[in-house]
Amino acid sequence: MPNIGDLVGRVIGLVGELIGSSSLRLGIAPTLVILGLLLVLLSLLARPAGRWTPGDRGHLARTGHLMALAAEAGTEAAFSLGTAGVARGTRALDRLQTLAALPILGHVARAAARGGVTLRVTANDPVAVLLAEQTVEQAHRRMGTLERLSESGVTYVGEGRPTAAALALAEQQVWGGAFVAGGLAEEGLLLLHGMADGATATSFGSADVGQAPMLLLEGEGTLVGPELYQTPGDIRSTVQDWTAAFTANRLIWLTVAVLVGASALLLLGVPGIPAFFTGR
């Protein structure tokens, strides 16, 4: 595995050799440019996960910290797959939302398993219950905490009726964290309000645009519209993937900015621009 310290040392040494061997006498502006480039390079290498991460959709990046607080307080976490599901009579959009919510459930379940927090999952569809059980089991297996699997559970409530499910899913209880992801309808306000009441933190998501006002009003972290479908890809991406992607993007934009700036100076008649960049 390459040593980052050696890489930084070689880059700094290379820049020093280029400056020392160049006949160009640097002024204030070139010196600032070189220092700025070195600062960008060091910023890319130092704490890349904290500097080049994407927007925190739904406040899901803080799930691990939230589970740690829940473990200290002795509270449980709740996750609802909404009032829809994947059964035969469900709309195609609701089915897709439920399937998109399963990776989010896996992310929350892994954080709960790592923190030793009991996770209560509820669904309004028997098939969704089976999928949720497999997701929670896989999360505990991945974290090596199968002995805690029996503490968590997936419950089928509402018997397929949306309003009854909303009332049952929104059982009044103090949650260390409340999460809702999946299809919602008019009864979604009952579900979201009940889950948010007494919860330390909330994260609600649904692709139903008509439910966006409820999500924004009731939830601290929200996934509205296509964000519900984009989030699973963000969760599955590793820190290295995001670091490489965002580093490449910023280097590309930096190159474009330099080319545009140099071209503008040439058009304004400023002499010596090519010589400045080539060191001749």
Image (tube, rainbow, N blue to C red):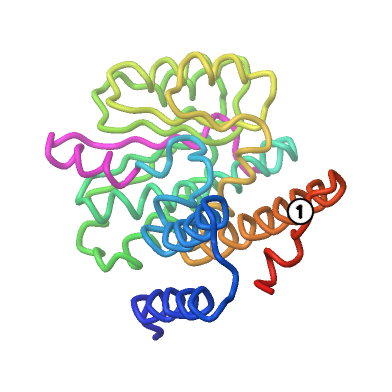
Q: Residue at x 56, y 51 (%)?
A: 29
Counting from the top left corner in percent of width and height, residue 222 is at: 51, 29
Camera-side residue of 214 and 65 = 65
Residue under pointer 1: 262
Please say whether residue 65 is one of the residues in the magenta stretch.
Answer: yes
Camera-side residue of 271 and 36 = 271
Camera-side residue of 55 and 111 = 55
Q: Residue at x 42, y 51 (%)?
A: 107
- Vertical relation: 262 (above or below) 38: above
Q: Quadrant of residue 157?
A: top left
Counting from the top left corner in percent of width and height, residue 85 is at: 60, 39
Q: Quadrant of residue 250?
A: bottom right
- Vertical relation: 142 (above or below) 1: above
The answer to whether 167 appears left or right of 86 in the picture is: left
Q: Residue at x 30, y 24 (%)?
A: 199
**Residue at disc 1, secondary structure:** helix
Please say whether residue 67 is one of the residues in the magenta stretch.
Answer: yes
Residues drawn in magenta: 63-87
- Position of the N terminus, as image quadrant, is bottom left
Q: Amino acid at mark 1?
A: Ala
- Position of the C terminus, as image quadrant, is bottom right
Category of crowding for the residue at label 1, using alpha-carbon neighbours closer than 10 angstroms: few (below 14), some (14–19), many (at least 20): some
Image mark count: 1
Q: Residue at x 76, y 53 (%)?
A: 262
Q: Quadrant of residue 208?
A: top right
- Vertical relation: 19 (above or below) 252: below
The answer to whether 79 appears left or right of 189 in the picture is: left
Counting from the top left corner in percent of width and height, residue 70 is at: 20, 37
Residue at far bottom of view: 1
Counting from the top left corner in percent of width and height, residue 105 is at: 45, 47
